[in-house]
Amino acid sequence: MKAAVWHNIKDVRVEQVQEPEVLPGQVKLKVEWAGICGSDLHAYSHGLSLEAHPISGQKPPLTLGHEFSGTIVEVAADVTGHVVGERVAIEPLIYCGECYACKRGYYNQCSKVGFVGLNRDGGFAEYVIVDEKMVHVLPDHVSFEEGALVEPTAVSFYAVRESKLKPGDSVAIFGAGPIGLLTLLSVKAAGATQIIVIDLSEERLEKAKELGATSIINGMRDDIVETIHQLTNGGVSVAYECAGAQPTMTSAVASVKQGGQVMAIAVFAKPIAIDMGQLMFKAADITSTLAYRHVFPEVIEMIGTGRLDVKQVITKKIELDDIVEEGFNQLINDKKQAKILVRPFSE
């Protein structure tokens, strides 16, 4: 079968690989659509760990892709909860089930956490094997394209749900990439009435405006915090950090009001400094989330009812053969792009 395999930095090859076989407790999917994530871009540009993952036992080269939907084509003999033909979205977290976090139900914070598509062969392929516990059925009226967006939407949805946001609150979202835009949709669904989005890209800011941002601010301005305070009469209730950079975190901390909150969603590539004096003076807090837990059914329901119109985030659809030039390289160089979906099978 065909798959996009990571071999090394800037070395992803679409090549023929052995079709995977189902083991006990697993199902096999025909992949319908898969989204390119910032984590995939990071793997492409900066590399992956060359060590074998402690649970999956797999190390590169491996097939990327952890945001995907598909159709079940085979189930192991001991799988009773799913059948061939089901349309599904995949929750790609790998976890042990035995550590302190897992035993409390906090499987996203497993001491050995990993991802299908980053620590085990993933969804940029015609077929993929996943564990039964990763499978979530899609209603007939939820498209496979929307199904591929359940995973990134879950990241934003979970962060918003874990934050202090209440209906009527004001928020600032730093970063208007796919996670920032999905956070925008999530805070809007949760009842935020003033939504301020900050980004360096005018194209992304225009997309944010289209999705419901009440104000947009170019990240190159030197009066970002002052503008947010003016717009909100003293600061936002919650600032969502979706960029993963020192300047945006600094602005996020400065933009919240007394008693406000900074919610860090992005992955930070290196340590950053935080002005604790500001937080203490405001009696504000800062927190973070990693991925998601126990929210996929709610996200699918929200998408199915139209409360989360995630289709708006899709900016391009491509074939698997074009994933490097039209996918990875395009996302790196073209800031108009938000979510690019990849189809492994040609029509």
Image (cartoon, helix red, strand yellow):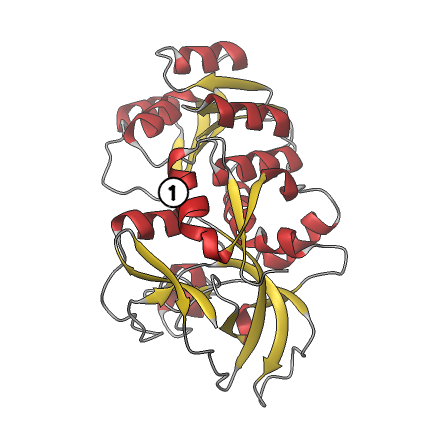
Quadrant of the frame with the C terminus: bottom right
Residues 155 and 280: in front is 155
Residue 212 seen in this snapshot: no
| Relative horizontal placement of residue 230, taking residue 188 as reference (left or right) | left
Q: Residue at x 60, y 81 (%)?
A: 74
Residue at 53% x, 68% y: name it.
134
Percent coordinates x, y for residue 62 in the rendering: 35, 67
Residue 185 vs 323, above or below: the answer is: above
Q: Callout 1: few (<14), some (14-19), or many (20+) C-alpha neighbours within 10 Å?
A: some
Query: What count of labels does the image hold?
Result: 1
Q: Quick one: which residue is furthest to the bottom in this view?
A: 77
Residue 219 is situated, as x and y percent measured from the top left of the image, at 39, 20
Where in the figure is residue 68, as x and y percent of width and height? 54, 59
Please report the residue visible at 73 percent of the width from the left and 51 percent of the height from the top. 304
Which amino acid, by three-letter code, is at mark 1? Asn
Residues 188 and 27: in front is 27
Image: 298 above or below 185 = below
Query: Does the rendering let one see residue 202?
Result: yes
User: Of 192 and 329, which appears nearest the observer?
Assistant: 329
Residue 339: x %, y % from top left: 52, 43
Provide the secondary structure element on which disc 1 rests.
helix
217 or 99: which is nearer to us?
Answer: 217
Relative to 183, residue 73 above or below: below
Q: Is residue 129 above or below residue 217?
A: below
Q: Which residue is mark 1?
A: 329
Quarter assignment of residue 138: bottom right
Residue at screen point 50% across, 87% down: 24
